[in-house]
Image (cartoon, rainbow, N blue to C red):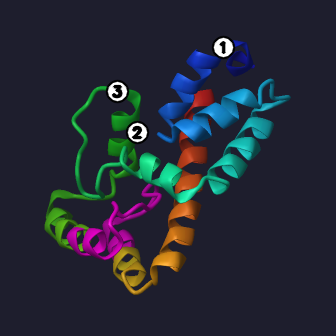
Amino acid sequence: MRFNALSRAQAEAELLTCCASRRWAADVAAGRPYGSAEDLFAAAVTAVRALEWPDVEEALNAHPRIGDRPPGGDRASAWSRGEQSGVGDADRAAFAEGNAAYETRFGHVFLICASGRGAGEMLADLRERLTNDPETERTVVHRELAEITELRLRKLMA
């Protein structure tokens, strides 16, 4: 597997495009060599779930709001645009309103694995999650971050 042959710095740089937590990238890179891609994916998900909240917040800071279109030409921006393809122009105002309410309540961006989900489904999830207490929401965010990270890591390894 090509990933095992990268230098530690190169491996961490590649991983940061999947999850912007430096701790996560360092932990996953340090776990090499992996026997298979599936071993890498399992280790990556385990490492996301083990992140402390400040590390999760670091990762969240790199995620655009649902409904925003990140303009960059980098890999992560392109992936975000593709993952949010279910959000059309007509949905942007509803997401802007929902995102503002969510950020006021929880203090961070609303994170959801958007890949394969339509705008209506994501808006319903956003509104439902606004009723969560902060501890429950952190658990949900961890789960969503793990899902997004695995999805992006699979793209990276393809």
* Callout 2 secondary element: helix
Mark 2 Cα within 10 Å, few/some/many (few <14, many 20+)?
some
Q: Quadrant of residue 108?
A: bottom left
Which amino acid does the dot numbered 3 rest on? Asp
Q: Position of residue 80 (x, y in %)?
A: 37, 44
Q: CA distance from mark 1 to mark 3?
A: 20 Å
Which amino acid does the dot numbered 1 rest on? Leu
**Going 36% across and 81% down the picture, which residue do you hit?**
130
Horizontal side of 90 relative to 10 (left or right) equals left
Q: Nearer the viewer, residue 108 or 120?
A: 108
Q: Quadrant of the C terminus?
A: top right
Residue where numbered disc 1 is placed: 6
Residue where numbered disc 3 is placed: 74
In magenta segment, residue 16: no
3 or 2: mark nearer the eye:
3
Residue where numbered disc 2 is placed: 79
**Going 25% across and 41% down the picture, which residue do you hit?**
70
Mark 3 Cα within 10 Å, few/some/many (few <14, many 20+)?
few
Which amino acid does the dot numbered 2 rest on? Trp
